[in-house]
Image (cartoon, helix red, strand yellow):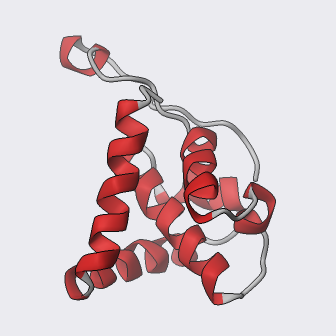
């Protein structure tokens, strides 16, 4: 878990949206799944940890302005390919599992409502 990236914005429309950092998204995901931030960022391969980690990576890509796979990979200490795979995996799960899609949407709303 390196660096603290936020959604730096330019322009009037962008200023209306709150600044969201990778660390803030990690905290919301950690709280929701009741898994520590350290475990989510670890190399552990337990299914519930991977589930939370992939969800966090996807939300970071979706919610942080101009956030690249490289920035997320640096944050988690992994490769760009890992982040790409995680995001694709979440997208596929959301298409095939309405309950998981609801989890992701709930997390998005929680992050946006808190003004993170």
Asked if residue 72 lies left or right of residue 59, the reply is: right
Of 90 and 35, which appears nearest the observer? 35
Which sits in the foreground, 87 or 40? 40
Q: Which residue is drawn at 42% across and 26% down?
A: 115
Residue 89 vs 36, above or below: the answer is: below
Q: Is residue 35 above or below residue 72?
A: below
Residue 105 location (% of width, % of height): 29, 57
Which sits in the foreground, 85 or 29? 29
Rendered residue at 76%/53% (across/down): 1
Using the image, determine if residue 24 lies above or below residue 26: above
Image spot of residue 55 (x, y percent) = 48, 67
Seen from the viewer's position, the closer of residues 10 and 30 is 30
Q: Can residue 27 be seen in this view?
A: yes
Left or right: 86 with respect to 104? right
**Quadrant in the rendering for residue 48:** bottom right
Instruction: From the top left corner, tell me how far across and down residue 24 is, in percent.
Output: 58, 39
What residue sits 76% from the left and 48% below the top?
2
Residue 111: quadrant of the picture: top left
The residue that appears at 21% across and 81% down in the rendered structure is 95
- Asked if residue 64 shows in the view, the reply is no
Q: Could you tell me how many numbered marks the image carries?
A: 0
């Amino acid at each position: 878990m390196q660096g603290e990236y936020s959604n730096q914005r330019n322009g009037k429309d962008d200023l209306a949206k709150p600044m969201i950092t990778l660390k803030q998204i990690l905290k919301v995901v950690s709280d929701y799944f009741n898994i520590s931030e350290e475990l989510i960022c670890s190399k552990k391969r337990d299914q519930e940890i991977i589930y939370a980690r992939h969800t966090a990576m996807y939300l970071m890509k979706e919610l942080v302005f101009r956030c690249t796979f490289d920035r997320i990979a640096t944050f988690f200490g992994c490769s760009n390919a890992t982040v790409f795979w995680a995001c694709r995996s979440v997208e596929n799960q959301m298409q095939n599992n309405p309950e998981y899609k609801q989890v992701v949407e709930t997390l998005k709303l929680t992050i946006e409502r808190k003004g993170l």
